[in-house]
Image (tube, rainbow, N blue to C red):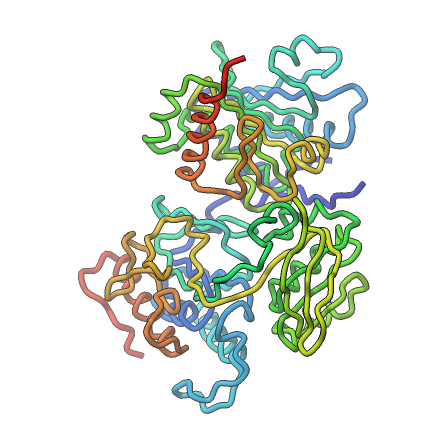
Amino acid sequence: MSFDLQFGLPDLNPEPNTYDVIIIGGGPAGTSAAIYTARADLRTLVIDKGLTAGALGITGKISNYPGIPGPISGAELVRTMRQQAESFGATFLADKVIGVDLHSTPKMVMAGTNTFYGKVVILATGSMGRTNTIPGESELLGRGVSYCATCDGAFFRNKTVAVIGNNDEALEEALFLTRFADKVYLIAPTPSLKASESLASEVAGHPRIEIRLATSLREIVGNGQVEGLRIRPRGGDESFLPVSGVFVYLQGGQPIVDYLMGQLQTSPEGCLLVDHERQTSIPGVFAVGDLLCSHVKQAVIAASDGVIAAIAAEKHIRERKALVVDWN
Amino acid sequence: MALLEEKDRQYLIKEFEALRNPVKIVVFTQKFECQFCRETRQIAEEVAGLSDKISLEVYDFEDDKVVAEQYGIEQIPATIILLGGEQPKDYGIRYFGMPSGYEFTSLIFDIKMIGTGESGLSAATKQWAANLKTPVHMQVFVTPTCPYCPQAVVLAHRLAMESDFIRADMVEATEFPHLAMKYDVMGVPRTVINEDTHIEGAVPESTLLAKLKQAVAAEAMLPRA
């Protein structure tokens, strides 16, 4: 019986994991903030789930970003911004933030691979969070429905499972599940996968993964535990797919705030509340971009938020009384 | 072959300098050690060797049945972290199964918590725990690759430190499939409270406290036998 357990310590030494600024989310808001904080010689870390986890990353073509005559893909635009931030010394980490402690000093950010410490945290996780659940999803949560393949994959050894989603995260989790499950269905609601090419081809070529594109999940069925899924391909008939587990990685339009575990208040719509410098009710914690449910959800608006927060963060860290602007 | 890498050993030696109280690790294994028992014992041996403040006792589940009963141990591998020294104290903090992968951080946290004598819980939670007069047993089911699980384990162990009525176990679900089945565990972390209440996920302190209050109140309403 091999569990492939990696007994390593997830790098407990805080020294290399301590930053001036930790930015959660690497879209236009987070990355623009990183450009400014890195240029201000603040040690900056950006933790990002994946290029295609965010709204800009999955946008096909953009032609109206000021200064960038298009058309350019959203992913390419984000990539360009990242490279710019990295050129000033910002560090980007591909990981998922699973929890934070914003009241501690320094502030703690717990990612899947490690825990990081920062004087300032800038929240830039956007609003691709889910709004609706699928029939059967909440009833069978923990009974075969899961949102964490690394947590629960072990319960499906030699079984058949499904992953619902189309982005980097969904594909990575599908690959992880092949260590345990005999068969993994990847059910994508869109006609094509919105993930990086290398990941998409790895999944397409995997003998244990079967991809079903343009297929919607109508219901998760089971009596006390998951027995199968009712699915319908676009333009086709509904059918029943027997599975023992279903891992859901769908997206919606809600601000993503679950990792905050209630440490910050949200508006009735689920948006974060900030002052004119984008600072939340916790000093040293800023929120930017679509998390604020701005009247206009556009990449350039998100970018400007990121910059405002970055300048305010610099003021906070260096205990200035007034903002100092980076004029070139 | 050592399980801990040298850089991690050096880091932990430094971390353990903050220990003020003596900490005792007690491990239950058996003569014909399975892979998990052997590695659990090895983890404990390596960690105990990193500080003078940490002592280790290893017992055989069969040969040392009396000791096993004293600690209420019914399955192995079992690891207990207690306050050591002249006046040892068992807070009811247990690990069933190997504290590996992400759970290694829980083990280190517990040693530091007992070694510094501070649970880190809020005043409100400490107050509730201090006033508690009925037993609460939490079993936190985990898998080693679950990044959210240590938060649930550590929270339960913190509570165990604050009250003699609270016991908290980490239970590694893949090593104890019969327990996972008994408590319907198909997703982790799942915290089972007093057998018939449960909560999913790594919930914040206030959420767990509310659930515990509910579980204790429900028990109080059961007809006495």
Q: Which residue is farthest front?
A: B223
**A161 horizontally vs A288: left or right:** right
Q: Which residue is farthest left?
A: A321
**A243 horizontally vs A277: left or right:** right
Locate the C terminus of chain A and report the quarter of the image it occupies. bottom left
Determine whether B162 is above or below A195 in the image.
above
Residue shown at 48%/9% (left/top)? B86
Q: Position of residue A145 (x, y in %)?
A: 62, 51
Locate the N terminus of chain A and report the quarter of the image it occupies. top right
Residue shown at 43%/41% (left/top)? B204
Question: Number of marks in the image?
Answer: 0
Determine whether B107 is above or below A33 in the image.
above
Inspect this view and state whether residue B52 appears.
no
Q: Where is residue B12 in the image (x, y as percent from the top left)?
A: 53, 35
> As rendered, which of A214 and A88 lies closer to the eye?
A214
Q: Quadrant of residue B104?
A: top right
Residue shown at 24%/66% (left/top)? A276
